[in-house]
Image (spheres, rainbow, N blue to C red):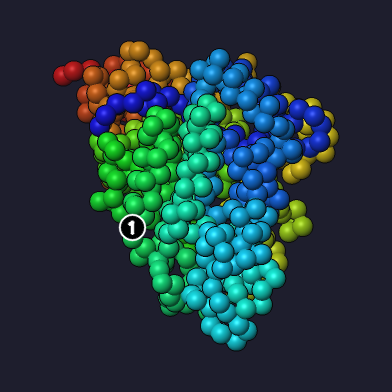
Amino acid sequence: MIRKSWHEKVAYQIYPKSFCDSNGDGVGDLRGVIRKLDYLKGLGVDIVWLSPIYCSPLADQGYDISDYYSIDPLFGSMDDMDELLTQAKQRDISIVMDLVVNHCSDEHEWFQKACADPDGRYGKFFYIRDWKEGDPLPCNWRSYFGGPCWEKLPGHDDKIYFHAFHKKQPDLNWENPDLREEVYKMVNWWLDKGLGGFRLDAIINIKKLLPFRDFPADREDGLCSIHRMLEQATGIGQFLGEMRDRTFAPHNAFTVGEVFNEKPEDIPDFIGANGYFSSMFDFAETILNHSDKGWYDQAPVTAEQYKAACFQSQEKAADIGFLSNLIENHDESRGVCRYIPEEDLSLTSKKLLAGLYFMLRGLPWIYQGQELGMENPVVRDISQVNDISALDQYQVALDAGLSPAQALKSIQMHCRDNARTPFQWDATANAGFTTGTPWLPVNSNYKTLNLAAQIDDEDSVYNWYRKLIRLRKDPVWKETVVYGELIPYLAKQKNLMAYYRKGEKTLLVAGNFQRQPQTMALPAPVGEVLLNNLDGFQVEDGQLCLEGYQFVVFSLEEK
């Protein structure tokens, strides 16, 4: 593996709408991000990814872009963006934006022109097909937000267009080289401006299985999961390799792909020496227990499942390249609520989860508020839900025979609103996020769970993350923590997640992923204890005694 400067860094995701509101309109903005750059620097962050801030009608919270070259006034102006890039650079922080090019907004100029002239240049930027009422659709794929992937083309009763996501997000036709040229021009415009790189949204979807065809239905609606198509689509490398060579590579830009359904043999193509991307997110843990029936059918994730998924991903990436490791993002529930049983949620268990994922080989990502141990809010009525995917899944649950109360409970764990509630800065009104009315209600626990309560508390989750970051950057241990091989240890011992990090030195990372104490055999005497989320550390007769949810990192003495 060729070493890159970004390998040693720590990355952070900001959901701008919920991070910091500078003008009291209830919505976070770019000036709010600028205001908090010193906070990010103090935490130890080097790379910041901003979720979409482009002009958008916000049908899908900014992932429906109507103008790639403009900042939505909701978030500020291009002058604010330029200042953010300048201020971040002064702090050695690189800014990364979302690159959303599987689809655009139906309010984008391209789609408006396609509607005006479906057979013209811009009509070929999309998947538009002739169709009349009563005809079968070109395929029976279900969109990610529910319902068929086809919608009538505005102004045309005899034509339909394809959308893998919301109907206001028409898919772009990457088979058209004219469209690709427009995308590359836009990407280079941003990189020339000084942007550090991109997170590539839904990028695996740009290659469709053509010609369109049906798959066996997996629900009573007669539709099938669009993932069936992704499993069979081939040839995406043509598009990704071309985009890399025309945009990312000449700028030495950092890129991280949102990639699902990759095959092990394709990993070198994605993140190898000449990969399409610098890195790609490891979603093996976040898709655990997925069910084609819907969220209501998903079982809770167990400690053993989490451990197995992490180790499988590490083995798959091996020395090919760096994965981007996470426990949550803007599309997921809060990691501490997903991977820790509700009855076991505590300061200790939150630190264990943080340590287990952060010490994995790869680039660690922190999602805003994760460093505080922020939790999912309690939703008491469907009217409180903003997330369009959760609203769809609520209806799926009702259609499956669940009561409204059961359906509401079934969406609470996976609702995207969980991670989108405002950042909890302090115990003042609206958690210090805004002086106005927040666009999404603040979690009711903000008066006790907030940054101000944690920043000076050495035992807090916030300062635990700072300790993890300091260890990663410590000159004595950096070579091992960043580049050391990851080797599972005692992988068959239930609810114990332990692994070596072997480089210039050898570290053993161990976490007791249950409330009951347990012991683990030591392969060698304990050397220096680098991290411990509890005060005690007991060794008896070559056995390490771990309390419930205890997490430790230590060196081993040579025998």
Residue 284 location in percent, x, y?
40, 49
Does residue 474 lie above or below 76 as drawn? above
Name which residue type carries label 1: Gly
Residue at the extreme right? 436
Left or right position of 112 against 171 = right
Count every numbered label the image shows and give the total: 1
Q: Quadrant of residue 325?
A: top left
Residue at x 60%, y 43% (from the top left corner): 68
Q: Quadrant of residue 52?
A: top right
Left or right position of 533 against 397 = left
Task: Read off the residue under disc 1.
Answer: 235
Residue 113 location in percent, x, y?
64, 59
Does residue 178 lie above or below 76 as drawn? below
Q: Nearer the viewer, residue 234 or 553?
A: 234
Residue 311 in view here: no
Residue at x 50%, y 32% (from the top left corner): 191
Residue at the extreme top? 475
Q: Nearer the viewer, residue 356 or 329?
A: 329
Q: Residues within 10 Å of mark 1 (few under 14, many from 20)?
A: few
Residue 203 in view here: yes
Q: Quadrant of the C terminus?
A: top left
Residue at the extreme bottom? 134
Residue 314 location in percent, x, y?
31, 41
Residue 46 location in percent, x, y?
49, 23
Q: SS class of the residue under badge 1?
A: loop
Residue at x 52%, y 26% (from the top left corner): 194
Q: Quadrant of the N terminus?
A: top left
